[in-house]
Image (cartoon, helix red, strand yellow):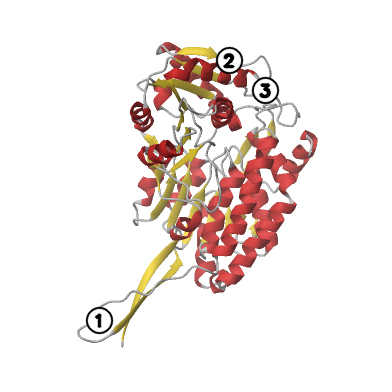
Amino acid sequence: MLTREDAEALARDVPAVPFVAGSWHSGRGLRPVEVTDPVTERPLAAVAEAGADLVDAAVRAARHALTAGAWGQLDGAARGALLGRVADLLDARREDLAALESLEVGKPGLEPRMIDLPQAIRTFRYFAGWADKITGRTIPTPGYLGQPTLSYTVREPAGVVAAITPWNSPTMIGAWKLAPALAAGCAVVLKPPEDAPLTSLLLAQLCHEAGFPPGAVSVLPGRGTVTGRLLTEHPGVDKISFTGSPEAGRAVAIAATKGFRRTTLELGGKSPQIVFADADLDAAADGVAAGIFANQGQVCAAGSRILVDQAIRDEMTSRLLARAGQIVLGDPFDKDTTMGPLISQAQLDRVSRYVQLGKDEGARLLGGGERPPRTGYFIQPALFTGVSSAMTIAREEIFGPVGTIITFRDEDEAVAIANDSDYALAATLWTSDVSRAHAVARRIRAGAVAVNGWSPLDAALPWGGSRLSGHGRELGWPGIEANTEEKTITIIL
């Protein structure tokens, strides 16, 4: 594993400028965006922000790549080969990318090595396999004015895709957006998160090394309010894929109405984890703790609403407290660390406000929620009990290591509490009753339900939600559908 010093040297080597149409732009005259180390609170890099000229250049280059450049002339097999090369390069550089993600995001080293990088590599490999299998269908009809017809459909690229990623898992989610769109033949302009753009800039380097033609992939660092806004409002963009907060998602959706452009929006969650009395409580406690404390709780699918059968309330609560107490806060590069810092001072302030609000509204803080006396944006993992569904901490996404324990009396009440949310992204059921698992999973309103495991991810599985969690799906065949248009062709014979 790379050391902190190795990762800092790598951060200095990554081009800190926009990548447009196969070239790195010096950034002369562009405003730098400072990337801060969440452990030391010191600057890691100053990345040049893409302004209006570069946004326009990237979108125009993407359009040219599709209509007149080499990218638009490639068939599915050739696109798949390029995606496969990116997967190989990611695999070869996985240690570099994992260390860089730990450095700029703050997640403990085990997490990007076990989750983010394997998922990113798997995503490029999976969609490399789809690239030459995107087919239409033949549709029989009664004919046209007495004449026989042959009607069929073809799937064509949606066009220029603006992809905007969040800071919590920039490598993995960047792969989620790039791979299906590129497999479908779209050209992609990626806007990485302003707090953590470095892994995305390294990914741009790998796409260039893999041999993608100019304009097929551009990466534009910058603030959401500047680069992100310019990109989503650009009339040359055909589709916007955004992962982030509901507030930012609304702005994206409004911008997309100009031209009635397509969107895929993944806007977070307030996911329930339901623990029934017949569950393996030790396994459930391990899974529930991972579901709320992984990546410092900065996960869209974080299982922050912990619904526990009142018959096992005390047993489950004691187990969760024990696991929270075993968490070691520290530098992600220290081998004993199991929880790193939050991404920024603003995020630390946000989580701290919710902890105080939970206490003010009458919930009982069992432990945690304090900032330790050290440098860095650290906060101790917190667990609340005595929580009702009406409380703010049970309704709003905190995006931090704060779990709320809510009890239920029976299956119907568990389902009612789980569905009493403005979000509908993910859910987890813990039970040894297979019939109950199937029955309750059907009743839960969520885009993905896991049983006896927290939020399994795979490139083959559709991912997305409804309500405030957004709309549309990424990954799997729906990821191809989301990046293609189906055209009907009828031949009168």
Query: How many numbered marks are there?
Result: 3
Apparent side of residue 405 relative to residue 296 in the rendered image (left or right): left
Q: Amino acid at mark 2?
A: Glu
Q: Position of residue 219 (x, y in %)?
A: 59, 52
Q: Earlier in the sequence, mark 2 or mark 1?
A: 1
Q: Amino acid at mark 1?
A: Gly
Q: Residues within 10 Å of mark 3 (few under 14, many from 20)?
A: many
Q: Residue 76 or 151: which is nearer the viewer?
A: 151
Q: Position of residue 211 (x, y in %)?
A: 67, 65
> Which residue bears the numbered disc 2?
370
Numbered badge on residue 143: 1
Q: Amino acid at mark 3?
A: Leu
**SS of the residue at dot 2?**
loop
* Residue 27 visible: no
Distance Cα–Cα, label 1 vs label 3: 69 Å
Q: Quadrant of the N terminus?
A: top right
Q: Residues within 10 Å of mark 2 (few under 14, many from 20)?
A: few
Distance Cα–Cα, label 2 vs label 1: 72 Å
> Which residue bears the numbered disc 3?
329
Q: Nearer the viewer, mark 2 or mark 1?
A: 1
Residue 360, placed above or below residue 300? above
Distance Cα–Cα, label 2 vs label 3: 12 Å
Q: Residue 35 or 382: which is nearer the viewer?
A: 382
Q: Residue 197 or 294: which is nearer the viewer?
A: 294
Q: Nearer the viewer, mark 1 or mark 3?
A: 1
Q: Earlier in the sequence, mark 2 or mark 3?
A: 3
